[in-house]
Image (cartoon, rainbow, N blue to C red):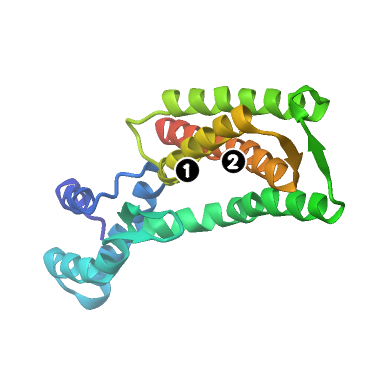
Amino acid sequence: MELTKEQIQQVENYLNSKNITYVDLRIEVLDHIVSEIEDKIIENEVTFHHAFATAKQNWNPKLEEATSMFFGLGFSAPKIVIQKAKKVYWKQYVFLLASYFLPFLLLTHFNFKIENPTEHVSFILFKGVTVLSFLAFMYMLVFRNYKLKTTYSFVLKSQSLSAFTGLIVLAIFFTKLKELNGINIGMFCTFIYATFSYFHFYKKHKEAILKHKIS
């Protein structure tokens, strides 16, 4: 049997109480719970209220508020959001680490070092790219759609503070840098890739919102 509009609204209210307002998960979770309730009513010949209560017992652990060391303990979301966020972010996290350690290990191995680099072409190039990355990052930070939430916006929110901290570190480096070496270039590469990663999830967030509006 199909649930009535009033019964579906009760499920909607339940999801609201659990903060399942992420547009890329909301419809999926709603459909799963509604289907589960409908199946229980037919198979077990029980009332809607009994089937709904059983479904809530099954879903409560997945929808409870949680945090993760992966994103920082200061950022909480329903557990199902955290799990999807980990799934979509872990590859970017690996590449982020590689963007630092690969240049660091490679250039340290070859003992790469440029003293008084401010007039060197490499420094000018890194400085230019970093400034462009800063401008792109600030644009995405300011013009991100805050009204609708997605799993990707949760990732963006959790990464905003670390990216902003990186800007401060780079600003200090630019004013006090006396040589280019594996450590410095590794940090430049990390920030540049972090901006690319931020853009990746910014784009995914926009696409999820557009898909939600179309559907």
- Amino acid type at mark 1: Ser
Residue ID at (49%, 25%): 138
Where does the C terminus fall, quadrant-wise? top left
The residue drawn where x is 56% and y is 30% is 171
Crowd rating for badge 1 (residues with CA inside 10 Å; few <14, some 14–19, many 20+): few
Q: Is the residue marked by circle 2 packed among few (<14), some (14-19), or many (20+) residues within 10 Å?
A: many
From the viewer's perspective, is 121 left or right of 19?
Answer: right
Q: Which of label 2 and label 1 is nearer to you?
A: 1
Q: Position of residue 1 (x, y in %)?
A: 26, 61
Task: Please tell me which residue is depicted at 50% across the width and 33% down the height of the picture.
Answer: 168
Vertical position of residue 151 compared to residue 131: above or below: below
Q: Is residue 141 above or below residue 189?
A: above
Q: Is disc 2 in contact with disc 1, using a CB cutoff of under 8 Å?
A: yes
Q: Between residues 159 and 174, which one lies in front from this camera angle?
A: 174
User: Where is residue 60, by image quadrant?
Assistant: bottom left
Dot 1: element: helix
Of callouts 2 and 1, which one flags the residue occurring earlier in the amino acid sequence? 1
Q: For mark 2, what is the residue? A: 194
Q: In what element is the residue under mark 2?
A: helix
Residue beneath disc 1: 162
Q: Nearer the viewer, residue 110 or 201?
A: 110
Q: Quadrant of residue 189?
A: top right
